[in-house]
Image (cartoon, grey):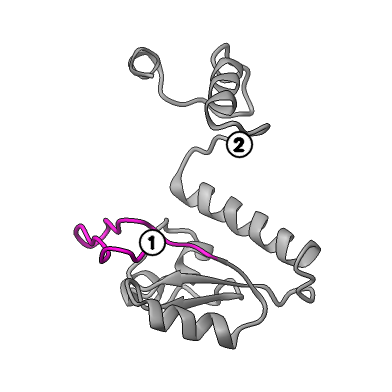
Amino acid sequence: MYKQAAKITLTSRAFHNTELGKFGEFITKLLRYDKFLPMNTGCEAVETACKLARRWAYRVKKVPDNEAVIFFPTGCYWGMSITARSGCSDPLRYHQFGPFTRGFELFNYNDIPNLEMHLKKTPTVAAVCIEPIQGEAGIIIPADGYLK
């Protein structure tokens, strides 16, 4: 990875390059997955995860169309798009940028009882998106056992 990053770190999937296929073979064998989808940014990655979670909720969990909910913790940061701002608790990021993407709700980061309460009252949950260590407003590390 270091050698490649010294040449070029990123190319769009819209353009052919000689390394993407090699990387795909390596990463899928390493992780024992049959597919991978590289992303350019955290925003793109989380938005793709939201799409996958919603599709799963509608097809597998049988959530009624347009009712899937994704929970994000307070203090999270995954980009500056309108959708990213929709799952944000920082007024500087969301004030005067609405209307926002529907179906995103917040729970208190590092507060398991709060998350459990939200999950119990929301039968249409598609996903919970958590940053293991929040880093936008300093380094915020959760309590032992939180992620487990």
Left or right of residue 7: residue 31: right
In the visual, does 53 lie left or right of 27? right
Mark nearer the viewer, 1 or 2: 1
Residue 59, quarter of picture: bottom right
Position of 33 relative to 139 (above/below): above
Question: For the point 37% across and 75% down, which residue is it?
Answer: 89
Question: Is 105 situated above or below 136?
Answer: below
**Quarter of the picture holding the C terminus:** bottom left
Q: Nearer the viewer, residue 15 or 143?
A: 143
Residues drawn in magenta = 128-148
Residue 79, quarter of the rendered image: bottom left
> Considering depth in this image, is 51 or 35 the residue closer to the camera?
35
Tell me: residue 110, above or below residue 36: below
Q: Amino acid at mark 1?
A: Leu
- CA distance for labels 1 and 2: 24 Å
Under tag 1, what secondary structure? Answer: loop
> Where in the figure is residue 73, as x and y percent of width and height?
40, 71
Q: Label 2 sits on what residue type?
A: Leu
Which residue, given by chain and number where applicable, does mark 1 sit on?
A: 147
> What secondary structure do most residues of the magenta stretch adopt?
loop
Q: Residue at x 49, y 38 (%)?
A: 40
Callout 2 crowding tier (Cα within 10 Å): few <14, some 14–19, many ≥20: few
Name the side, left or right, on which 20 lies relative to 6: right
Question: Residue 98 appears at what percent x and percent y?
Answer: 51, 76
Residue that label 2 marks: 37
Residue 109 colored magenta?
no
**Crowd tier of the residue under label 1, counting other residues whose Cα lies within 10 Å: few below 14, some 14–19, many 20 or above:** few
Residue 34 position in % (x across, y down): 68, 32
Residue 102 image position (x, y, % from top left): 61, 75
